[in-house]
Amino acid sequence: MPAPVVEGTLLRPRRFRTHDQTRIVAACFWLAAAIAVRILGRTTWELSVADLSELLGRMPVPLLDAVRATFAGIAGIAVLVLLVGVLVRRRWVGAWSAAVAAVLAAGVAAVGVVAGLVVVDETAARTAVGIALDPRLVAAAAGALTVARPWLPRRWRWACPTLLVLYVPVLLIAGGTELASLLVTLALGNLVGAVVLLAVRSPSCLLPLDAVLAELTSRGLEVEAVRLDPPARGPFVAHVELAKDEWSGTGTAHRLRLEVLSDDDRTADALARLRRLLTLRRPGDTVPFSSLRRAVEHEALVALAAERAGVVTPGRMLVGQPEQSWMMLGTTEPVGTPLTTLFPDTTARRRRRKAALAAEAPTPDGVDATAPAARAEDLLDQLWDDLATLRRARVAHRAVRPAALAVRDDGRLVLSDFRSGQIAAPDVQLDLDLAQGLYTAALVAGAEAAVRTAVARLGPELVVRGARGLGPVVVPREARGPKHARDALIEDVRVEVERQCDVQAVQTYQLSRFSRRQLVQLVLLVGLTYVALPLIGQLPRTVDAVRTANPLWAVVALVIAALGPVAAALSLRSCTTAQLPPGRTVAVQVATSFVGTSTPASVGSLALNARYLTQTGGLPIAAASGVIALQSVVQVVTHVGLLAILAVVAGQTLDLSHLVPGKSVVLLVIALLLAVVGVVLAVPRLRRTVLTQARIRLREVVAELGSLARRPGRLALAVVGSCGVTLASAAALWACLLAFGGGNKFVAAAFVTMVGATLATAAPTPGGVGAVEAALIGGLAAFGVPSEVAVPTAFFYRFLTCWLPVLAGWFVLRWLQRRRYV
């Protein structure tokens, strides 16, 4: 029999090797944990090594040598047996890859010895057993075993991690090596081996075409040609031309579509299950399959159950195992014309590529590629009938998307891809099938036709149940498209359901485990707690000083601090032409106290103001960004101007050494800035993005400045508002200084406030916590304020202007969110 013609590549690109990539991530986590244990518990490990050495020293020398030699011999022989097993199986790529990994791992371990992460017992290293169990050789063995493991038979694979664990007692007994150093050594070897596997290849990256053809030949199928789809995430897809039909039983099938699955697909399924477990409240997944064979058998079983229920599926399936760790699933071809070919509008950026590939395939005769609206509605009727049939049979598809639908020559809709399906599914999974069906139908024929056909076939009650599950989480990833288009389509479907089903509002239930708002609030609370903990130690001293403070000036400081949000609201309203309610704008500025303190560089404040401008002011995102940039420019200009004036008033005798950060801080800031600039300049795509965004923002600021300059009244109000924010902070510090008996020093208070705020902008802590306090205390000391007055003054001032607004900002932010103002 002549060899079949093969078209396409058999090797999966590195970016799609999910199994190898996951192996590297796991190795990195192991190495990070080992290094953390090694560094943080250095003293404990040193004591444990001393105790172990003392214990071993009490044993008779001949017995100890015999134990060491026995353990070393068992470990060494086992490693050699596994590596020889790779050679015996003629896995030449695996053999030389293991050798390369061993050499590289030994070199990396040697670097670890120099860095102090890996400890070598010089006393034990003088013996033959000690030389055999040198950490560098251990790392080489770990790297070689990591590479050799995928090339070994499945029953031998568990021996590799078992040997790595066996090295722990071996080395502890052989030379008193500390456990943390041993973990680092094994982790280094494992990481090097994982990187070598990704750089070269593992068995799951190369399609065993000869084994696949042999499997087909053993079933009596004569293969003439094989065409492979371009490799991507997911199984290899092969289109097989047969000389004659000896399999389908109809005598008309001369082509097969094979999906060949490997460990990459099993790992991708495990990661998808983990993602659903972490992100969904009720993922509804069954117990993970113990092997790839079980997963393929499950897909075939669900497809058979759907077919027996009355749903048209691709038909008879071919299931086989061409080679160890490989499974294949075949169906007759052509199943039909993919829905993504008949309706190109169902494809977005990623799906456009799939539609182009499908368009290159020959279209069956009699298929109308234009797909008029009447035919679209007929297909939707069939879709709803199939989903109703599956619902009665309690079979959940869980991936109702355009790529899983095709149309036969006779116009019948075919449902495929039951990989995520479930038998005896609960109601929630069946409802989510309806939600995915609504989204897919809206992609095909629009929201109005999708809901109308669904109501006609399913009834209003089931349609409302399906609409309750609509959301980005349940929409298959390849069917989502751009975020704005996806959200708009989901909202259109909800509106149509409310109109056609005569319901007031579709109450969607929360599918995700954490909503976006809950995640943001959790991050803010964690950041706020982190920055607040270091200041708790200063509370007793500050409380004692507050008891002796002048209450009148303390109240004055509180009132003045409350004027800051009012001035900020005036500045924001003056920088935009949008009609912003004054009271609501002040409330937003109070809320920024919470989000701004919880994020570095007040990023949260800028984001909240931008969201307020878009939702309440009705501005586009670009215009809102321009307003925020304009307000920032006005604040910087007024801040620098006031600082220059106060510097002249303060005089040249001022000692600012307390405000100047140390050399280490300056060098750290410079290094971080240079690193960021270097990364931006080194990555062409990032560089173009940054330059493009900078030009856009600059044009927006220039345009807003020109608009503001043509209206002197608005410009004056913007300047007054910006000055009011700075002067309110300065006056609050001045009142706090008077409350604690620091004297009437308004110029000092204003200068220290502005200099401290300027220096704190470079601080990496959220809200500048820590840096602001240090700058205030140092600045007051520069003006001759005693430390016993400067410290409580600074902390009481920060309590009034930072922590008290944070508490109020939390409640105000919740109120704004409930009213949907932000």
Image (spheres, rainbow, N blue to C red):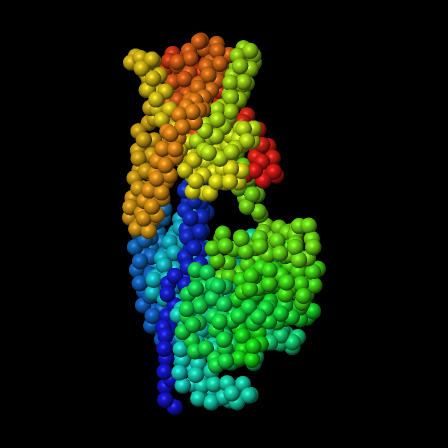
Q: In this orientation, which residue lies closer to the viewer: 497 or 107?
A: 497
In the picture, which quadrant includes the C terminus?
Answer: top right
Does residue 470 sit above or below 52 in this rendering?
Answer: below
- The residue located at (70%, 63%) in the rendering is 459
Q: Quadrant of residue 702?
A: top left
Question: Outermost residue toward the front?
Answer: 710
Does residue 668 sit above or below 70 in this rendering?
Answer: above
Q: Is residue 659 left or right of residue 724?
A: left
- The residue located at (30%, 29%) in the rendering is 663
Q: In this orientation, which residue lies closer to the viewer: 556 or 368?
A: 368
Q: Position of residue 384 (x, y in %)?
A: 63, 68
Q: Quadrant of residue 441?
A: bottom right
Q: Position of residue 671 (x, y in %)?
A: 31, 37
Q: Position of residue 638 (x, y in %)?
A: 37, 24
Count numbered badges in the picture. Answer: 0
Q: In this orientation, which residue lies closer to the viewer: 726 or 449?
A: 449
Q: Is residue 114 left or right of residue 291?
A: left
- The residue located at (29%, 13%) in the rendering is 652
Does residue 742 sit above or below 479 in this rendering?
Answer: above
Does residue 386 sit above or below 177 in this rendering?
Answer: below
Q: Is residue 54 visible?
A: no
In the picture, which quadrant includes the N terminus?
Answer: bottom left
Q: Is residue 246 left or right of residue 282?
A: left
Q: In this orientation, which residue lies closer to the viewer: 769 or 150?
A: 769
Q: Position of residue 518 (x, y in %)?
A: 57, 43
Q: Is residue 634 visible?
A: yes
- The residue located at (42%, 48%) in the rendering is 32
